[in-house]
Image (cartoon, rainbow, N blue to C red):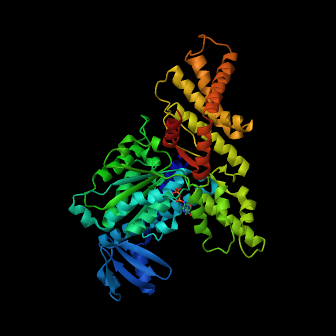
Amino acid sequence: MFKSKYNNIIIYVSAFVVIILIAFAFLRNNAHSITLNQAKQLVQKHQISKVIATRQYTYLDTSHGYYKIASSQVTPKLFENYQVHIQNDKDPLLYILIVVLILGIGSLLFRLMQKKQYFTDNKTSPTANTQNEIQNDLPIEVVRPNISFEDIGGLAEVKSELEEIINFLKNPIKYHRFGAKLPRGVLLIGPPGIGKTMIAKALAHEADVSFFYQSGAAFVQIYVGMGAKRVHELFKAAKNNSPAIIFIDEIDAVGKKRDGAQNDEREATLNQLLTEMDGFEDSSDIVVVGATNKINVLDDALLRSGRFDRRIFVELPTKQERNSILEKYLRNIPNNVDTHKIAETTVGFSGAALATLVNEATLLTIRQNYSQVATEHFFQVKDKVMFGKRKILMLSDKQKAYRVCYQAGKAVIATFFDIHFDKLLLSNDQITPPTNMPAVKSELQIRVKMLLAGMAACDLKFNQHSDNAQADLKAAKDIVSKMLYVYGMGDVLMPNENAKTEMLEALFQEVKNILKELNQIVAYAESILEDEECITKQQINKKLDALL
Ligand code: ADP
């Protein structure tokens, strides 16, 4: 950032110097002064091609130079054979023209140098700022997306939640007549690559309204006020094209919680966004759709009523949804792929990862000269599919069985001890009770039991567990350590090193015993996770109530 600021200063200074030099060259009077005698000689030798008279000087243009002599020295008689051109000493129009020309050339030069700077910066070290600056340079464009809900695989719940907004945008009069108000902000929450941008585009398409896309990062500028200006421009453009959908991707880049640290630019941008949203007239028919991966980092002001008060959680696709996404992508590709089989083994894949998987398998088919894509091709490319920095592997049947058992154990213990959670997914999902509230010893013990439950369930069923226990085990150890050595919750206030092992082992045994008792419930949870890749606390509670 400093490098870029420093470079900008250099560009400004050099542009200024160039402008001064050009101005100097233009305005400099480059005629040589001559004496009256020399002028007379030029006349006698007929060397003068043009005579220009101003109030101060008379200029003589010859084939070998340009000369001047004070007008007060010459008599009109001297140039009686010439047509004398009269000119004002200072033609203001000429000066204005020159100044405009200089400013024009100067700013052109400045922009050219700035563009060159972006490219060199991006080639060497693509910093967020230079990229933002480029984005900031991009005009705010209105688009009419041609993606429809049909093109999106799965996400049925999300689509139905958006149905009302579509109807509203299509028939505003009907809704206005009842005094109904359009939700101003919809927040799509979910991991990257899951189709949030697609949904927003499809929303605009289905409602047949204009679509404006901006990334939150594009608002974060180095210069205070730039981000806010861009927000204002965006909303202005949307109002001029209403009804419209404004989509702000990665809204957390602008809307992060104000944590006390001074960041004038971000604050100004966020305030502008809030002001624009509050300033919507009820009839403006504009919906702002924000996308984020992490709702918990968003500033409360954004989530207040009248702003982003509709929240839609977009989750990783389930087995059926993965199947439908795969079918969509294979629609126009010659294939005999068993999509159910692929869907079965791609737990944790997002829509984007599935699209990449299909593409990789197709490329492999072409490389190997087959006439159609086969299931086998998917398995051959599975290791190639990267998702962000983390590689997701397709699960084998055995790995899946371990994962199902692990999550089932965790969900059952969490429900048994009434730990807060709505549902647990098969895809490495965590149960994260709020940690910022004070907890007593028994509550912390329960938390540790929940963290050890997956391992306990697998040990009971398979006599071993898999390496996905790593994160939970670490979290369990951390809590036990704190309980013993920070909160003084051991048998004695200053326990020795063994105390940690003892406490962990004791809690692990307790969990195992509970799970043994509840083995029917665990089996039930496993069957649900196997089929739906997701289980709710409510489902387990129902079974528990029936049993206990
Ligand atoms: P996000 O905005 O959540 O990061 P995108 O909407 O940009 O995700 O999705 C990236 C790409 O992944 C899309 O262009 C599309 O090709 C594919 N994709 C994601 N989800 C789906 C889905 N449910 N159905 C079909 N394709 C999907």
User: What's the residue at 60%, 18% (across, down)?
Assistant: 484
Instruction: Tell me if I can see residue 372 in this picture.
Output: yes
Image position of 297 (left or right of 121): left
Q: Is residue 76 above or below residue 160?
A: below
Instruction: Tell me if I can see residue 27 in this picture.
Output: no
Viewer-proximal residue among 410 and 268? 410
User: What's the residue at 40%, 73% (across, down)?
Assistant: 68
Q: Where is residue 304 in the image (x, y as percent from the top left)?
A: 34, 44
Instruction: Indicate the quadrant where residue 535 lies.
Output: top right
Picture quarter with ligand 1: bottom right
Image position of 386 (left or right of 143): right
Q: Where is residue 438 in the image (x, y as percent from the top left)?
A: 47, 24
Viewer-proximal residue among 548 and 538? 548
Q: In this view, does 303 lie above or below 97?
A: above
Image position of 466 (left or right of 275): right
Q: Where is residue 219 in the image (x, y as percent from the top left)?
A: 44, 52
Q: Residue furthest right?
A: 368
Viewer-proximal residue among 136 and 51? 136
